[in-house]
Amino acid sequence: MASAGTAGGELEALEREVVDHLFLLQPGYAVSLGLHEYDGRVPDLSTAHTDRWAAGADRLLRRLEAVDLGAVDDDRRVDAFLLRLLLESPLFDLRESRDLERNPMSYVGTVSLTSYLARDYASVETRVAAIVRTLEEVPRLLEDGRRRLEPVLPKPFVELALAIGGGLPEHFGEAETFAARASLGARVAAVRAPAEAAVETFLEWLRKERLPSATPDFALGATRYQRLLFVREGIEGPIETIRKAGLADLERNQARLSGIAKAQGVPVPDLFVRISQDHPDATAVLPTATRFVEEARAFVVAQDLVTIPTPVAVRVEETPVWGRALSTASMNAPGPFDTGSVEGIYYVTPVDPRWTPVQQEEWLRSFNRSMLRNITVHEVYPGHYLQFLHFRGGSRSLVRKIYISASFTEGWAHYTEQLAIEAGLGRESVLAEVAQIHDALLRDCRLLVSVGLHTEGMTLEAATALFQREAYFERLPAEREAIRGTFNPEYFCYTLGKLAILNARARFLQSRFGGELRAFHDRLLSFGSPPIGLLDSLLAGAGPGTAGAPA
């Protein structure tokens, strides 16, 4: 008992130290979780500071290794594993993928005021003060980037950093407008000017000093990719197993799509034409999304798919101007430490009135009713919003409130798209399933392109062609998806997570949950957002062992 108590006490002390240490490097992550004592903090990304941070992480890892985990229960062994990943993941970024030396998005992507603009968690004065502190630090942050970035950088990284950075002045302008509504605009304006000047200096430096020498050399390589799978998702199984699982899912989805087309007596492309023609007009996009939110919530309740914690509150809004270039729709959910409203904000990107009539019609066709319904399932019920209600409301350890796995989070939301079709949502038309399969094919291609680009020498042209052929994309969006894979290999997370959940359902639904979907889903969501490699051991009630990939 003394041994167990000592080990438990050591782990509890380390848990807080690891979390505090993580937030020294990633204060913006703390803010997104609802820890507003970190408001307005911008990380110090100088070499001296990150070297000190890495040395501190090494010391904490050695202390974690020294804890006698045989003297604690399974839950705390899982917690110890999560603490290890919370340290090893940023160490991978610093030392192995070397993001701060190779990727200028590490700097321009750090500057975000969204948390202070989107959610009413404190007074306007408090939020404006955080905006001001953030903008004051922008020149220092970008100067660190100029000192640290290497002479030769991957071209896709530079080009996207230029695109993201080019949107920052408009983002800063939105913050000033927000502050002006409370007669505080002058406070933001005073720091906005030097921040924007620093952004322009940085972007001009990228254009003149880094873009001309940029190369297409972006790949992680098989060794680092394998390491990425472990530090992000606890997966130690071979990359080839993941690739084969993604390919098999793509083939299943293509076969089902071909079956639907045959039954309808049309070629597959005609199914997508039918979908695109059934769309709301520009004024009805948000009202249609609002109706689909209510439809999806009622459907989850009627089918008894998963518990919806109460209270609930979702409002549909236009995507803020600064987010429209990279987002069609998204969910801004409360963090697990937010003590205020549970309200989720479902952002939907509207038609831009500055577009030509042809461009507006193209956008509306992509926002057709079948696709918008599927997106709503993914973003709201029973997808992201419902998941974060469980995440926020659960009683669990500190580290499980901190750790968020992309493959679990996006995997759950992607899995619920298929779940909704299986349960009969939109069964009055085959187009609902066509829309779901279309999104599934996109995610399958992302997984295959991620593996291909980073471990198999796949070219961007071959990746683009894969999206065109297998996901039925036009050239431009296919090319954008391929480029995204160069800097975001983790967009494998949708299919990887979905397959892990489907495999776990096949293995445990009958044996442990008597075939009751709601019990299975509630148990799944009770874990928080663990690395997907732990899913089977968590459902089996065991601690972390050797984590494998989806079969």
Image (tube, rainbow, N blue to C red):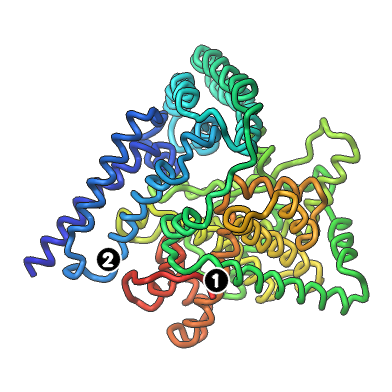
The structure residue drawn at horizontal position 60% and vertical position 28%, both measured from the top left corner, is 165
Q: Where is residue 37 in the image (x, y as percent from the top left)?
A: 34, 35
User: Which numbered circle lies on residue 210?
Assistant: none
Quarter of the figure that contains the N terminus = bottom left
Residue at mark 2? 77
The structure residue drawn at horizontal position 51% and vertical position 38%, both measured from the top left corner, is 119
Label 2 packing within 10 angstroms: few (<14), some (14-19), many (20+):
many
Q: How far apart are marks 2 and 1 (CA)?
A: 27 Å
Q: Position of residue 277 (x, y in %)?
A: 89, 56
- Is 433 on the left-hand or right-hand side of 517? right
* Depicted 40 relative to depicted 348: above or below: above
Quarter of the figure that contains the C terminus = bottom right
- The answer to which quarter of the image holds residue 93 is top left
Q: Position of residue 185 (x, y in %)?
A: 54, 16
The structure residue drawn at horizontal position 81% and vertical position 71%, both measured from the top left corner, is 429
- Is 268 on the left-hand or right-hand side of 479? right
Q: Nearer the viewer, residue 460 or 540?
A: 460
Amino acid type of the residue that numbered disc 1 sits on in the rendered structure: Thr
Residue 128 in view in this figure: no
Q: Position of residue 477 (x, y in %)?
A: 76, 48
Amino acid type of the residue that numbered disc 2 sits on in the rendered structure: Arg
Q: Which of 114 and 346 is in front in this view?
A: 114
Specify the farthest residue to the right: 265
- SS for tag 2? helix
- SS for tag 1? helix
- Is 395 on the left-hand or right-hand side of 102? left
Residue at mark 1? 241
* Depicted 107 relative to depicted 311: above or below: above
